[in-house]
Amino acid sequence: MKALRIAIAATAVVAGYQPLLAAADPPPGAASCSGCHSPTAANSAIPRLYGRDAADIEKAMAGFRDGSLPATVMNRIAKGYTDEESRAIAAWLAAQK
Amino acid sequence: MGSNHRISRRDFCRSGAAAAAASALPLPAFAQSAPRVVVIGGGFGGASCARALKQIDPKLQVTLVEQSKTFTACPFSNNVIAGLRGIEEQQFGYDKVVAAGIAVAAQAATAVDATARTVGLADGTSLSYDRLVLSPGVDLRFDALPGYDEAAAKKMPHAWKAGEQTVLLRKQLEAMDDGGLVVISAPANPYRCPPGPYERACLIAYYLKTKKPRSKLLILDAKDTFSKQRLFQNAWKELYPGMVEWVSLSQGGKVNAVDAATNTLITDFGNHTAKVANVIPPQRAGRIAMIAGAADNTGWCAIDPVTFESRSAPNIHVIGDACLAGGMPKSAFSANAQAKACARAVATLLSGGSPAAPKLINTCYSLAAPDYGISVAGVYQPKNGLLADVEGAGGVSPADAPRDFRAREANFAQTWFATITAEVFG
């Protein structure tokens, strides 16, 4: 009975939290990505970001920002985002299907 | 019934807004019925916005008003002019927009009553809305350049709205003998696609160099500086030496009048008679923006940078080429990015919330040759009532990049076009 109560409580927390992160509100800047990065095409010259590992996206953005990762245009775009913004965008992209 | 319902809800909201101001209560009316959003204009801005609205809240009743059954995209239409691409590759239908649950009204919008919140259509019917989004693109001003009207455009094409005009300019170039003079007249800012005239110069030069190498291309400009200037000028020197000449405003480049009968462009410093004349005239927001009271005396639409709501017409939002978006250029990428941010803001407002400040990106690719791409990018956020560049971000491709870098950017340009058109129309 106690276990069930805990399970219900955990479900409630997840149910209340998950939609906010997964679908509802992309953080500022995230909606622009799909202008170039296709949410569907798998074999594109520009990589798909949906469903990718959040840490990888965040690391790439940091690399573009400090110049350690060479790029044509992402270096110019990444400089418009803080670490916190990149982290939020990466988490949102990772949660997309 | 629908109309009674609408009025009662609106009246409720008016009193509800007062109550909300006093007690910060949410507005429950919207939770009970499906708010209606009408979007005018089925291009990169309007079609993106309609789809984003439906995706954000499937319950919204979204109607897209667009009189053309087929959309002809401007990005990559310079490739059509250069004979590198068929016009049909630029064309997209609205089947998938309809399949997404959006009602498409295939007619012209002829009236907007901002008080009654209705849009009048060409067939005499009207659509009611809770919020209206205008994405009408540009109108070419046939009253701004003496001698250049719609009849003159059939002789001296603008090709600044893709379609028939694009094909006409292509045919004129094909028909021209080797050794002919091609003249492009570029307008003052602001106008649709700031780097467009210069990309066009490159790709026409590419065609001439390949097929008619004794020909010349002259750009008569109403400006002293332009987008990606150094990159374009380097490309002209590197790829088309002796073929392309740019005449700036201060060198007398501004075209003051044209004579379509003789294909002559008239400047303060003399007349240029062209074999092929491409006149890109001054522009303003599409006419419906003026009818709706959303355009100011410059002909463009001032907006709130968070919601894209018109500064002059309440409940009417303006996106894309028609709006004054601060630092954001008038591009398909901008229109698409603005559309998604605007859809989010409209859906939030309709549910009684207050929209968060957006952060937007623009990336514009231009081709100096089929395998030579250059780009400009920017990141934007609301600041002092405008969409301002985020400092330290953005800029153009490096001036000293090797050719494989240019080739990669040309490839990315193609991929971008495939991706964005799939998002909007696919």
Image: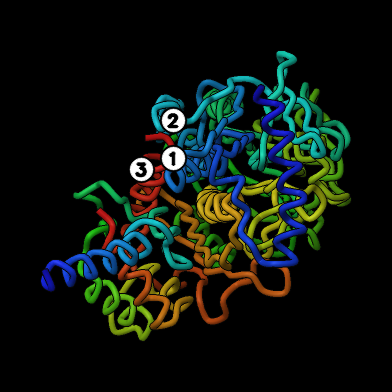
Q: Outermost residue, front direction?
A: A1
Q: Quadrant of residue B227?
A: bottom right
On the question of residue B24 being in view, the answer is: yes
Would residue B336 be found to the left or right of residue A50 on screen? right
Find numbered disc 3 in the image and state the secondary structure of the residue it sits on: helix
Which chain is mark 2 on? B
Which residue type carries mark 2?
Answer: Gly
Number of the front mark, 2 or 3: 2
Task: Name the residue tied to disc 2.
Answer: B101
Q: Give the crowd class for mark 1: few <14, some 14-19, many >=20 residues within 10 Å.
A: some
Camera-side residue of B373 and A44: A44
Distance of label 2 from label 3 (alpha carbons): 23 Å
Name the residue that disc number 1 marks: B58
Which is nearer the N-term, disc 3 or disc 1? 1
> What's the CA distance linking mark 3 and mark 1?
26 Å
Circle 2 Cα neighbour tier, 10 Å, few/some/many (<14 / 14–19 / ≥20): some
Please tell me which residue lies in front, B46 or B70.
B46
Mark 1: amino acid: Pro
| Residue to which mark 3 is pinned | B418
- Give, as a three-letter code, the residue at label 3: Ala
Mark pair 2, 1: CA separation: 8 Å
Q: Where is residue B217 in the image (x, y as percent from the top left)?
A: 61, 45
Label placed on residue B397: none
The answer for which chain carries disc 3 is B
